[in-house]
Amino acid sequence: MQSYDVIIIGSGPAGLSAAIYSARGGMKTLVLTGVNAGGQVTQTDAIENYAGIPAVDGYTLYSTMLSQAESFGAEVRYETVNEISVEGKEKAVRTDGGDYTAKAVVVATGARHRKLGLENEDALVGKGVSYCATCDGGFFRGKDVAVVGGGDTALTEALYLARLCNKVYIVHRRKEYRAAKVLAERLRATENIEEVLDSVAYGLEGSPVEALEVADVHGGGVRKLKVSGVFVAIGTVPASDIVKNKLETENGYIVTDSAMRTSVEGVFAAGDVRVSPLRQVITACADGAIAATQAAEYVSKLS
């Protein structure tokens, strides 16, 4: 069993930011990436609100941060955590590749895509249903597709798909979007995007997908959109299963104080997995920096 000062679970912006600060601060640091190394950011076509960087694609940002963490001495293992024991001064982490211990742990496991909850949704994943436009948009080049959602992610995906697809419907349950105003303006200026507002996804037809049924929220009936693809962008749910009943949570999100300390001494949380008023790359990085700094301080006091 290998021992470290700090183990970071997760390799998105929060996890890698934590790794940079931890390793640079002299801590023997291990990053466990999980099954999706880099997290949601690697599926983002363009990030244009990260301060100091006008625009960058998510995978490039992830790769740069990973190289930076490794340059300071952080060890990265492409393993998935199966179990964590948070009792006592030494925290134990079991993965699909081995067992490790550390004096402090930073949980930065991020979040997963929220599903529509339609009866045949799971069966149609890969057959017309997708949660990532940059991953799967190329399969629908020249075709008609729909995006469900009204936040930054949904509008960004619709704009990306509009460059590839014949027509893009954007389905949102309200009349106004939650997304940034600049994105809404770009969307409305794009000729091949049609807004389907005050509507919710009602059903999926075909296998592969041939149509999306949408219901008017004001009782105006059901409309059928003939599409080959449906891209779901309705938010996320926290990937906090490994700490269920071990740390204090709120609706699945880990509760922390301003120093990223959780309800258990020596365990910190950062990024989308924790309770936060904003979940963006920039806030995830800030969380990671704070969590790692506090973790290093905690480890130093144990010595």
Image: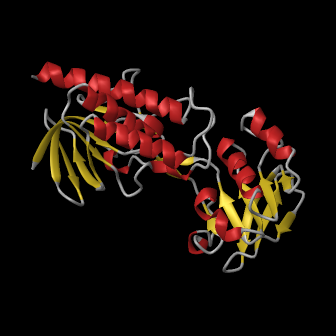
Percent position of residue 131, x then y: 60, 59
- The answer to whether residue 81 is seen in the rendering is yes
Quadrant of the frame with the C terminus? top left
As drawn, 200 above or below 181: below
Q: Which residue is nearer to you in this view: 192 or 241?
A: 192
Look at 30% across and 55% down and name the residue there.
78
Residue visible at 21% across and 23% down in the picture: 298
Q: What is the quadrant of residue 125 in the picture? A: bottom right
205 relative to 272 in the view: left or right: right
In this picture, is 239 found above or below 228? above
Q: Does residue 269 appear anywhere in the picture?
A: no
Q: Nearer the viewer, residue 26 or 268?
A: 26
| Count of all numbered marks drawn on residues in the image | 0
Residue situated in front as seen by the camera: 71 or 263: 71
Residue 222 coordinates in the image, percent (x, y): 85, 64
**Residue 19 pos. (x, y %):** 32, 35
Q: Residue at 65% of width from left, 66% of height from top?
A: 138
Q: Is residue 41 above or below residue 125?
A: above
Q: Residue at x 15, y 43 (%)?
A: 101
Report the side of 210 relative to 301 (left or right).
right
